[in-house]
Image (cartoon, rainbow, N blue to C red):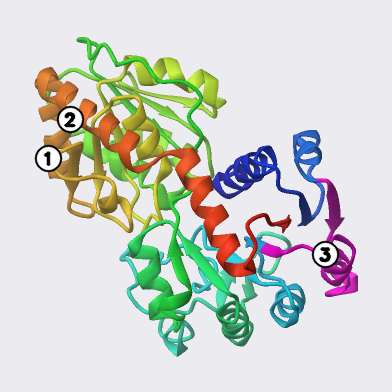
């Protein structure tokens, strides 16, 4: 499960525990953890591409929800059925898929972040209508600019658009959405227990946790670490399409003995690394909609060093709970990491400030209550049945 799926399951579980009834209209079966989902949703309605909007209409008629909560949905027939229906719809915008044909909101060669809304610039000179084709021998496939414009128009008709940060709100405004219909509800991960404070010992452990794909900038992180002049270890937890290239780069730069790629670990196994680390690094070079890994680091009392990209600057306050580094500035990134490794009292102080900030600003129960209030406003009811 990626971040959107984790958020949806946690949110649905919390809403059910508060007495709400939920049904889900979902995509193809994966065979993974399906029992967890079936325990939460009282009814399930699988989509069928051959039947267009029929499953969506069937779900609305049979379950009769008070509100519909949409995640990661691009099927135009389904979106049209929801927009034309009588039930109020809220849409959670997890990332840039809705308004970016490439979905990652930067130019692939330079990785320079795009600051435009969806428009003809996406066709030329951006060329986002052409995508790599991994399914057959033809090297490219076509993305429809007109289908994307229609998808945006359908979403503009929804009662509410939910985003995690002011940065994402600005992206929606840039694409013509009504400011009065946009609300900010950061998708806070659930925190079971208070995490112990790190020992900040002489091991000088640097922690990266997340996907290893190009937008996450693990290659830029490795290039930055090659400039760090004090002894350190770096553990990279995660997997992805860019892993092999990053491992090769690490060997090339002489970091094979310092940087370890551990692969994906379930959340319960991450805890021991948080407890041993001295700093958490967030090297994303794509415009992060939120960056929940930073919140996890703060809950564990770790200072963070991250590039100033997307919404990261809304929870990482430079000099308060870590250091916010200018985008792609490898030298300064290395300097800030080195500063925290050399000065453990500073690292501990920034980590404790981060823990307090996370406690005050990002509570899971507070997040769920905010959604309940939103649904109540949409429906005019204090208790709502939700179709996700």
| 49 up-or-down from 95: above or below | below
Mark 3 against mark 1, which lies toward the viewer? 3
* Residue 212 seen from this side: no
Return the disc, 3 or 1, that comes first in the chain's sequence: 3
Mark 2 against mark 3, which lies toward the viewer? 3
Q: How many marks?
A: 3
- Residue 216 is left or right of residue 71, and the answer is left
Q: Which residue is mark 2?
A: 350
Please check the rendered image and state whether residue 48 is part of the magenta-colored stretch, yes or no.
yes
Q: CA distance from mark 1 to mark 2?
A: 8 Å
- Residue 352 is left or right of residue 376, and the answer is left
The magenta span reads: 42-68
Q: CA distance from mark 3 to mark 1?
A: 50 Å
Q: CA distance from mark 2 to mark 3?
A: 49 Å
Secondary structure under tag 3 reads loop
Residue 63 spot, x, y in % from top left: 85, 60
Q: Are marks 2 and 3 in contact (CB under 8 Å)?
A: no
Q: Residue at image x 85%, y 75%? A: 52
Q: Residues within 10 Å of mark 3 (few under 14, many from 20)?
A: some
Residue 64 image label: 3
Secondary structure under tag 2 reads helix
Q: Residue at image x 59%, y 61%? A: 376
Examine the image and state in which quarter residue 147 appears: bottom right
Q: Residue at image x 37%, y 41%? A: 218
Residue 245 image label: none
């Amino acid at each position: 499960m990626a971040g959107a799926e984790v958020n949806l399951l946690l949110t649905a579980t919390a809403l059910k525990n508060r007495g709400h009834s939920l049904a889900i209209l979902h995509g193809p079966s994966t065979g993974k953890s399906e029992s967890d989902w079936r325990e939460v949703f009282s009814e399930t309605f699988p989509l069928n591409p051959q039947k267009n909007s029929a499953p969506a209409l069937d779900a609305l008629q049979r379950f009769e929800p008070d509100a519909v909560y949409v995640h990661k949905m691009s099927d135009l027939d389904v979106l049209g059925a929801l927009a034309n229906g009588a039930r109020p719809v809220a849409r959670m915008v997890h990332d840039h898929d809705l308004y970016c044909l490439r979905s990652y909101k930067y130019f692939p060669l330079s990785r320079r972040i795009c600051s435009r809304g969806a428009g003809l610039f996406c066709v030329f000179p951006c060329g986002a209508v052409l995508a790599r084709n991994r399914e057959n021998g033809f090297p490219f496939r076509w993305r429809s600019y007109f289908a994307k414009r229609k998808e945006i128009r359908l979403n503009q008709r929804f009662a509410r658009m939910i985003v995690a940060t002011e940065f994402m709100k600005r992206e929606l405004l840039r694409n013509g959405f009504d400011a009065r219909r946009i609300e900010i509800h950061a998708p806070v991960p659930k925190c079971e227990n208070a995490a112990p404070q790190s020992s900040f010992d002489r091991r000088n452990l640097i922690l990266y946790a997340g996907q290893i794909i190009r937008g996450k900038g693990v290659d830029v992180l490795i290039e930055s670490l090659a400039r760090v002049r004090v002894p350190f270890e770096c553990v990279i937890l995660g997997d992805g399409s860019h892993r092999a290239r990053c491992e090769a780069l690490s060997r090339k730069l002489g970091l094979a003995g310092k940087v370890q790629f551990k692969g994906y670990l379930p959340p319960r196994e991450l805890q021991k690394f948080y407890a041993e680390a001295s700093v958490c690094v967030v090297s994303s070079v794509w415009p992060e909609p939120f960056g929940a890994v930073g919140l996890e680091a703060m809950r564990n009392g770790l200072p963070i060093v991250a590039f100033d990209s997307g919404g990261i600057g809304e929870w990482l306050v430079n000099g308060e709970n870590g250091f916010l580094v200018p985008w792609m500035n490898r030298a300064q990134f290395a300097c800030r990491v080195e500063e925290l490794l050399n000065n453990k009292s500073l690292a501990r102080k920034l980590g404790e400030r981060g823990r307090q900030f996370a406690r005050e600003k990002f509570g899971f129960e507070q997040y769920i209550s905010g959604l309940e209030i939103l649904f109540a406003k949409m429906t005019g009811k204090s208790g709502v049945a939700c179709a996700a």
